[in-house]
Image (cartoon, helix red, strand yellow):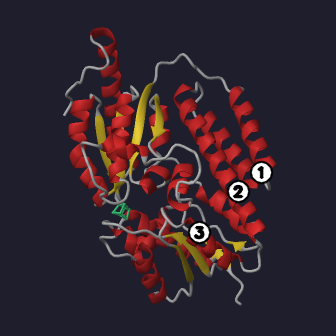
Amino acid sequence: MKHRRVTFPHMGHIHIALKAMLESIGLEVIVPPPITKRTLSRGIQYSPEFACLPLKINLGNFLEAFDLGANTIVMAGGWGPCRFGYYAQVQREILRDLGCNFELIVLEAPDTKFSAILGQVKELAGNCSWRQIGYAVRLGWEKVKALDALEIRVQQLRPREIRGGQVEAMYREVLNDIDRAANIKQIRAALQEGYSRFQKLILDMEKPVVRIGLVGEIYTVLEPFTNLHIERHLGRLGAEVTRSIYLSQWVNDHLFAGLLRIPSTKTYWNLSVPYINYWVGGHGRETVGGAVYFAQQGYDGVIQIGPLTCMPEIVAQSILPQVSLEQGIPVLTLYFDEHSGEAGLLTRLEAFVDLVRRRKKREKKARPKSQPVPIW
Ligand code: SF4
């Protein structure tokens, strides 16, 4: 059997958990270099122009990992009305045409068959026992949970910091500690240590901030390179961000078939009725339900993000004006592609945050919060 050097696509900080999990079943892991403009331009060069932005970025990841010696790709598969179901096949063909001799292992049919995924992991792991595989999955899961807990703390602290950049610098340090943690005990210790360090920062906890719910296509929501670090920008503008989906929820909903007892994004499905009653692929329905959720929780605004031409998000976008009107919450939609630039993004974010801040002040003075406010 050939020696596998395994790689996978980047999506937020998932590489930290995947690396730990795969290494603990004895695999050699090659993490693709962090996503840069070079990654994107390599992906663009060989992808069909109409392909979704995440496909292009991930293709760039694979090409950069190939240069470092990777020969096996592990990635999630999918199905449904949008293009996600074709991702792996398209990438397989492109890589083959380029002469990149990869074995592509697609963790197919997520959402329903956890046993099938475990079987694929067992095949990948070769001689490992089920016990070792179980531990590897627990180790990866513990890292995913720690990463989410850390991100949620950072989202709360960003708008309240006094000296710009302090929270970000500390965030990177704690991320490295979680990455280095070799077992579950060390992961928990790294997170606790991170919390203590954050407590030593000088923050203005009384500062009036606006609360923004971030909804949209999963990859764009989780991958800061794709969304041009939107959360960091919003934090600097004095907005506390909460996402409609976190990595642990995606892993639980799509890879663990929702077996673990953590809040599921499926709860957004109930909230999306009566605006949308059927699955439109991707996270379109969660986007609508998420906007309703944030409105009901008293958030000040919702930002929907997705890759340009993302079909499920276009469907959701067409429904959001009605949600905004009836639920009384301002909604901004932003699409990203290879031509998006940070300056343009900042201008729109500044305008939106300014709008929701003024509206909040006005509401405080004038009327009860529950009354709907037409803003479209
Ligand atoms: S959800 Fe959107 S970005 Fe993702 S594959 Fe479907 S159409 Fe493309």
> How many residues crowd around disc 2 within 10 Å: few (fewer than 14), some, or many (20 or more)?
some
Give the image quadrant in which the ligand numbered 1 is located: bottom left
Does residue 35 appear in this view?
no
Cβ of mark 3 under 8 A from ligand 1: no
Out of 285 and 64, give the one closest to the viewer. 285
The residue indicated by pointer 3 is 115
What secondary structure is marked by label 1? helix
> How many residues crowd around disc 1 within 10 Å: few (fewer than 14), some, or many (20 or more)?
some
The residue indicated by pointer 2 is 138
Q: Is residue 144 left or right of residue 351?
A: right
Q: What's the residue type where badge 1 is placed?
A: Ile
Q: What is the spatial separation of the Cα atoms under label 3 and label 1, in whole angstroms?
A: 24 Å
Q: Earlier in the sequence, mark 1 or mark 2?
A: 2
Q: What's the residue type where badge 2 is placed?
A: Arg
Check contact, mark 3 vs mark 1: CB within 8 A: no
Tally of numbered tags: 3
Out of 152 and 113, give the one closest to the viewer. 113
Does residue 212 appear in this view?
yes
- Name which residue lies at 63% across and 41% down: 150
- Name which residue lies at 77% across and 75% down: 128
Q: What's the residue type where badge 3 is placed?
A: Ser
The residue indicated by pointer 1 is 184
Q: Quadrant of residue 79?
A: bottom left
